[in-house]
Image (cartoon, rainbow, N blue to C red):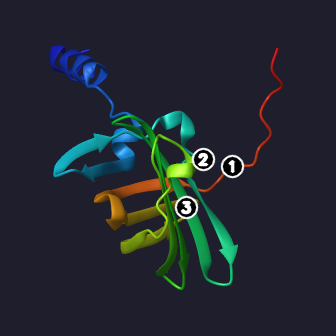
Amino acid sequence: MPPFRHFLILGLALTPLPALAESAGHVVLHQGGQRHVLTVDPATLGNRSSWSDLGDGRLSFQIDAAGRGGVWIVGMVVENRRPVDGTLIPPAGPAQAAADPEVSLRRLRVSGYDLQVAGSVSDPARALRIDFDLTVPMIDFAPTPPGP
């Protein structure tokens, strides 16, 4: 094999592949005038970070993103490509969820079993907003293997 092929193969083998969470997109928390990048654990994709077809032009999605203070949960219900309801739950838990969240949707595209979505959910009362631009898989209801 010619030497340049060895270098090419070695170079390709050493090139790092992007992590699934990085390739899925980004989630950013805006709070108190500061910007915090949140991460989506690849293990949650298809389960806690997923979307579901509700029928009749409706779908919902949820994103679990970890960062400042723990796991933030953002969700939205979309009807005929328009956001109709949202969820924003901080790490403190559901008791601290946004009472009347504002929702914004910039992009929504179903591609096979994946949902490409960009928008935001905010809690004006607490001056916080979570922006997202990512791809999440359809929820996977497959049974999990039994534990020990």
Disc on the earlier residue, 2 or 1 = 2
The answer to the question of whether label 2 and label 1 lie on touching residues, with beta carbons closer than 8 A, is yes
Residue 10: % across, % down: 25, 16
Question: Is 6 left or right of 20, judged from the image as shown?
Answer: left
Query: Which disc, if any, is residue 61?
Result: 3
Residue 85: % across, % down: 52, 74
Query: Judging from the image, what secondary structure is the residue with disc 2 in?
Result: loop
Quadrant into which the C terminus falls: top right
Question: As displayed, is residue 42 above or below residue 1?
Answer: below
Report the residue at 44% width, 68% height from top: 101
Question: As displayed, is residue 22 above or below residue 128?
Answer: above
> What's the CA distance linking mark 3 and mark 2?
10 Å
Instruction: Decide: few, some or many residues near mark 2? Use Cα within 10 Å; few <14, some 14-19, many ≥20.
Output: some
> What's the CA distance linking mark 2 and mark 1?
5 Å
Please name which of the two marks, 3 or 1, marks the residue nearer to the observer: 3
Question: As displayed, is residue 80 above or below residue 46?
Answer: below
- Amino acid residing under circle 2: Gly
Residue nearer the viewer, 89 or 111:
89
Query: Which disc, if any, is residue 140?
Result: 1
Question: Is 67 left or right of 45, judged from the image as shown?
Answer: left
Disc on the earlier residue, 3 or 2 = 2
Disc on the earlier residue, 3 or 1 = 3
Report the residue at 37% width, 39% height from top: 39
* Residue marked by disc 2: 46
- Amino acid residing under circle 1: Asp
Quadrant into which the N terminus falls: top left
Report the residue at 61% width, 56% height from top: 138
